[in-house]
Image: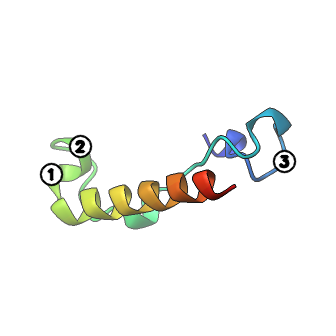
Amino acid sequence: MLAVDGTSGKYAEFKGNVATVYSHPLSKGGASNGHYNGNAQTYMNIGDAMGRAMAALIKE
């Protein structure tokens, strides 16, 4: 996913219409037992980062 992030320049056709959020540093949950280990803080961190990425795309 990071290869088509729209900012690296690797795929020019994605510039300005694709954003990628690297979620590993945002994760507070474990590696098993459900998505993000059911940790609400992780869901909020990921959602906030994705929202900011979408807003940045709209501004372009």
Q: CA distance from mark 1 to mark 2?
A: 6 Å
Q: Quadrant of residue 59?
A: bottom right
Q: Count how many numbered circles sit on residues in the image.
A: 3
In the displayed structure image, the side of residue 16 where residue 1 appears, left or right? left
Q: Is residue 21 visible?
A: no
User: Which residue was labeled with disc 3?
Assistant: 9
**Is 9 placed left or right of 54 in the picture?**
right
Question: Residue at coordinates 23% horizontally, 43% vertically from top-left?
Answer: 35
Judging depth in this view, the residue of 41 and 48 nearest the camera is 48
Q: Which residue is painted at 27% across and 62% down in the image?
A: 44
Picture quadrant where residue 24 is located: bottom left
Task: Give the residue drawn at x 34%, y 56%.
Answer: 47
Distance from label 1 to label 3 (Cα)?
A: 35 Å
Query: What label does residue 53 carry, if any?
Result: none
Q: Point out the tag, 3 or 2, that comes first from the N-terminus.
A: 3
Is 33 on the left or on the right of 26, as rendered? left
- According to the picture, the residue beneath numbered tag 1 turns out to be 38
Q: Which residue is mark 2?
A: 35
Tag 1: amino acid: Gly
Q: CA distance from mark 3 to mark 2?
A: 31 Å
Q: Are marks 1 and 3 in contact (CB under 8 Å)?
A: no
Q: Is 43 rendered above or below residue 5? A: below
**Circle 3 — which element?**
loop
Indicate the quadrant containing the N terminus: top left, top right, bottom left or bottom right: top right
